[in-house]
Amino acid sequence: MKFNNLRASYKLWRAIFSLLLAMLLVTVWTQTQTRQVNATNDRQVAQFEAAIATATGWRGMADMAVSMDIYSVLTTDEAQSQIFEGRAAQRNAQINLLQKRMHQAAATPADKAALGLISRTRADIGGLGGMVQQMKVARDAEASQVFIDNDYQPRAVAYLDAIDKYLALQVQQRDAAKQAAQAARDHVAGVAMASTALVCALGVLLAQWLVRSNTLPLVPHLASVPKPSRPVARAVAQPPIAQAPLPTKTMVRPALVKPPAPGPRRPVALTAAKPIQPAAAAKKGAGDWESI
């Protein structure tokens, strides 16, 4: 009987192919999901890192611009006042470009709200431009100091605090994106492990199905086979009787018997022969010829 005649090899091949296909699907899905999660995380983290770097530069330029405005108001030297005013104008021009770019890159409602707060606080400082020019023209040190302490300084602090809040928001969003990406990777790993366990269970079920599909068709044939009688069954069930080993034949060589020594020889008496008669010899010879 050939193994192919039972069609078990075809069933086994289908089972193995199904398991391999399931493992391939699990592997492809895991790799695809992991790649998507990593790509999304890298893109978000890069975006937040760029926003953090931009906000850090914005914070430094805003601090310098505010300091230049304060120095230009408090100084009594006209040349130094113009130098400070020129540097403040340069920083404000750079801040205008940064602020425009940050508004365009804002994607979340929290970013837009933080940028709106920065714009309002900066506009409050810009509203003091007329008073700043009046203080520069008057050159009154006491009045200028009162103006800086009561009007300009609180608005400048609010402006810088708004930038700090935006910077902290970007750091918080970056950390949240990293945590979400890690949670997504853990979820993908958990689903992959569950899928692998499911494939293993499917392999066990397929193995059981193969065994049953090959043994169940033989049950009717085995049922039709007559059962052995009770004495025969008892004899079959009993252990075999140990047989004694057969005796081995041994060959006994006969003992060598020494022949007896020869005795003394006895003398033999010699008798004289009787003479043969010629007539009897002739007659005997004739009879012999006749018999021939």
Image (tube, grey):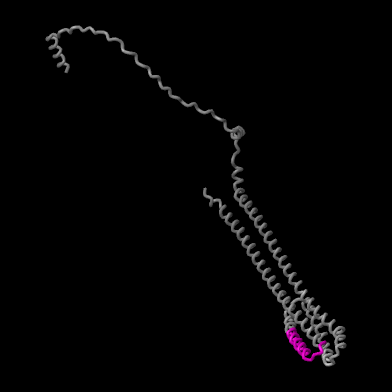
With 205 as the anchor, is 261 left or right in this view? left
Q: Is residue 109 visible?
A: no
Most frequent secondary structure within the magenta stretch: helix
Of the 4 image quadrants, the one containing the C terminus is: top left
**Which residues lie in the magenta part?**
74-96
With 170 as the anchor, is 264 left or right in this view? left
* Residue 16 to residue 101: above or below: above
Q: Residue at x 56, y 51 (%)?
A: 6
Where residue 110 appears, as percent x and y from the top left, is: 78, 76
Question: In the image shown, does 16 or 70 lie closer to the viewer?
Answer: 70
Q: Residue at x 67, y 69 (%)?
A: 38
Where residue 212 appears, as percent x and y from the top left, is: 62, 50
Residue found farthest to the front: 77
Q: Tell me if residue 78 is in the magenta stretch.
A: yes
Q: Residue at x 52, y 48 (%)?
A: 1
* Residue 259 to residue 181: above or below: above
Where residue 34 appears, as percent x and y from the top left, is: 66, 66
